[in-house]
Image (cartoon, helix red, strand yellow):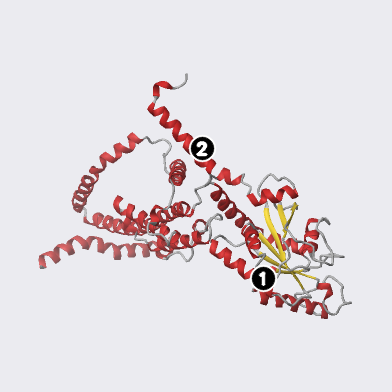
Amino acid sequence: MPALVLLALALLLPALSLIPLGSIWLWQKGYVLYWAGATFVAASLAFLLLQRLLRPLAQPLESEAADEVPKAIWNARQEQAWKDVLAFARTADTSRLSGTDKLLDLGLETITLVANRMHPETSDPLLRFTLPEVFAVIEQASVGLREFSEKSLPFGDRVTVAQIMWVYRWRTVIPLVEKGYDIWRLVRLVNPISAATQELRERYTRQIYDMGREHIARRLTEAFVKEVGQAAIDLYGGSLRVRSERLERHRSTATTRDARVAADIAAEPIRIIVVGQSGAGKSSVVNALTGNMEAAVDVVPSTTMATAYRVTREGAPEALIIDMPGLEPGEPGQAALLKAFRDADMVLWVLSATRAARAVDKAALDGLRTAIATEGRAPPPVLAVLTHIDNLRPFQDWAPPIDLATPTSAKAQTIRAALDAVARDLVLPPAKLIPVRADGQPYNIDALWALMLEALPEAKRSRLQRCLRDVSEERWNWRTVLSQAAGAGRIISRTAFPGERAP
């Protein structure tokens, strides 16, 4: 033991003696302060760099946050499945990237998670897809891999498969190289000081590399789970049953029927239904929005059937405003209203400020909310339009504009109280309510348009999901089945009788 201590001192003494001798030399040359300042700056930079590497990100990057936004075409159940995928991605074990079997198991676990969420009522959720959807997933994945190889893989558009296989065959050389490096580490002990310095440098470099590798492994694991989960949601949610080009040119049956009255249109418009009790002023609101007097307006309620109007406005897509029959107590018109609501992208619920009885509106709106929740798609935005505000007390006080944010006049306070009552009775957010005067001298119609434009993103999302549902339902018809049977017959004929083809 003493001999080993003496040997260690003999090896370390030359290096340790440099500390006092170097300090004396710096003092004699007057470089002590410069050396201390440079050392402090270098140590501070190293400390800050180490803190940055060790500190976890407080929030995801903008690109990561954008990747976690659900697609507009997804319905409520698909969005919930996407939340499950994101939660699973954050907790997935990064070591599962180390082998092909583990990676496949991770992908299968992600797919199973999505399938169970999308089809909880079936015993075999993993098989709930069609062959065209499988091919669509393969096509989608192939496009993504091609873009990755061309834009994100160095020399991805130059390296051939033969070269990749050559590198793969030479993978067995790596252990030999590692053994050769271990021999080199023994050889360089001839210079102990240099060997110790290099060992320390390599140790810290390996620690930084391990930290970076763990971070990259986490990012890769999350990206893999997200990609697989996104494809699975599209597959099991029915988003791949319809080609995008067919969806873009699709026009629903309801729109085709209503457009015969309004006019022919080039693409699927935003469908806005106007709902309310008879005499609430629905037709007056429609007239104010469309800028014409085509809808019947009278003291006696006159709308007994749905009437459609085409509306174009600068800065907004084309829309169909559909004036629905007036709501009546009971169930007779509930089925028609539910069907119209199912085909709607936005709902204008018209209520009279002078009519406090809103039980009919409340029952109808609750029924619509239940129906849309059962269907699973994103609900269309519901905007409450309060009419006849000029007839509220005091009757003779009508001097617009009226400040409802800080109501000071008696008229403003009465209108504010009526809005609060509607929001409370129909369980609607105050931001979705707008008071207007639609007859005589229209008031606040521009504010109604502004509120409709504000709700336009929700309406577009509802339209997209409605078109996807509509096209998917139209796919199952006898014409399609006969066309598929004829195509199969041609293939069988060409296979069975290859010599009898027409020249």
Q: Position of residue 476 (x, y in %)?
A: 52, 47
Residue at image point 48% right, 52% down: 234
Q: Nearer the viewer, residue 340 or 438?
A: 340
User: Label 1: few (<14), some or many (≥20) within 10 Å?
Assistant: few
Q: Residue 496 appears at what percent x and percent y?
A: 38, 28
- Residue type, label 2: Ser
Reply above or below: 355 against 473: below
Q: Position of residue 253 (x, y in %)?
A: 63, 49
Residue designated by label 1: 330
Query: Spatial distance from mark 2 to mark 1, Cα to Cα?
Result: 46 Å
Query: Is residue 409 visible to us here?
Result: no
In front here: 288 or 223?
288
Give the number of callouts.
2
Q: Which quadrant, please, contains the N terminus?
A: bottom left
Q: Residue, x 79% and y 56% (percent of image)?
A: 290
Q: Is residue 269 rendered to the left or right of residue 152?
A: right
Badge 2: residue crowd in 10 Å (few <14, some 14–19, many ≥20): few
